[in-house]
Amino acid sequence: MAGSQEEDYERAGLGGRLTPGSAPALLLVDPARAYVDPECPLYAGVEAAVDAMKVLLSDARRAGIPVIVTRVRLRADGSDGGVFLRKVPALRAFVEGSPFGDFIEGLAPAADELTVTKQSPSAFFGTGLAARLTAIGIDTLVIGGLSTSGCVRATALDAMQHGFVPVVVEEAVGDRDPAVHAANLFDIGHKIGEVWSIGRVREYLAPPG
């Protein structure tokens, strides 16, 4: 029977709903200058997503929830980049000393917020992040960052696999190709976690009263 893609997925039993918990944290994935600096090969034209990330960060701080910001940082010779660097040579933008690996202005973590340095797509792989979140009782991760099809998707998948409810904020993630961005949001929303509008997330994060 013909129908929309959404209907097909629902008939197949994909797209159950997850309910975010009462102990969220904000996770911003790789808000790096590389993605907004036209001088960098990784420039992706994601300025609107960056603006949304800044709104989320402000709301999270106002709500007093934990904030985690990730970054990719490789040794100057790239020796710790592994297969990831071999597959994506543009990741040399993130070697030590490159300004493209710096946080975008306005998205750097504060001194009392957690910075996670990674060499792989997922914020969880080889970082100890899951144990840290479990120790402080986090049950939900509100996720923004770059890029949707890469490190955001990998992080959302690992969040789910570690038992945290992933809520990817639609306007606060971005990718260099709109079609790839949209396809990954659709897939995340049907197989991995929730994809919420920034308005809905802001209501969720708003302090009671």
Image (tube, helix red, strand yellow):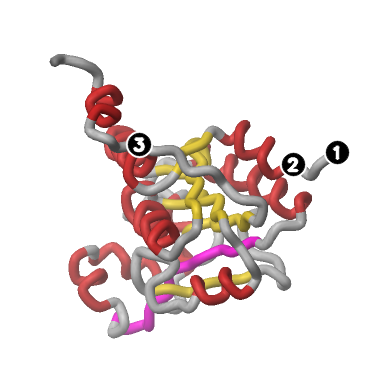
Q: Which residues are magenta?
A: 67-78
**Can residue 83 be seen?**
yes
Query: Left or right: 117 with respect to 66?
Result: left
Q: Residue at x 40, y 69 (%)?
A: 94
Residue beneath label 1, please? 209
Q: Quadrant of residue 51?
A: top right
Q: Earlier in the sequence, mark 2 or mark 3?
A: 3
For mark 2, does the 10 Å Cα neighbourhood hold few (<14), some (14 to 19), or many (20 or more) residues? Answer: few
Disc 1, disc 2: CB below 8 Å? no
Secondary structure category for the residue under label 1: loop
Residue 65 place in picture, x, y as percent: 71, 57
Query: Left or right: 21 with respect to 161?
Result: right
Give the Cα distance between marks 1 and 2. 9 Å
What amino acid does circle 3 point to?
Gly
Q: Nearer the viewer, mark 1 or mark 3?
A: 3
Secondary structure category for the residue under label 3: loop
Disc 2, disc 3: CB below 8 Å? no
Q: Residue at x 39, y 50 (%)?
A: 147
Residue beneath label 3, please? 15
**Can residue 181 be seen?**
no
Q: Quadrant of the C terminus?
A: top right
Q: Earlier in the sequence, mark 1 or mark 3?
A: 3
Q: Residue at x 24, y 66 (%)?
A: 89
Residue beneath label 2, please? 206
Q: Quadrant of residue 103?
A: bottom right
Disc 1, disc 3: CB below 8 Å? no
- Residue found at the far right of this picture: 209
Q: Residue at x 39, y 38 (%)?
A: 16
What amino acid does circle 2 point to?
Ala
Secondary structure category for the residue under label 2: loop
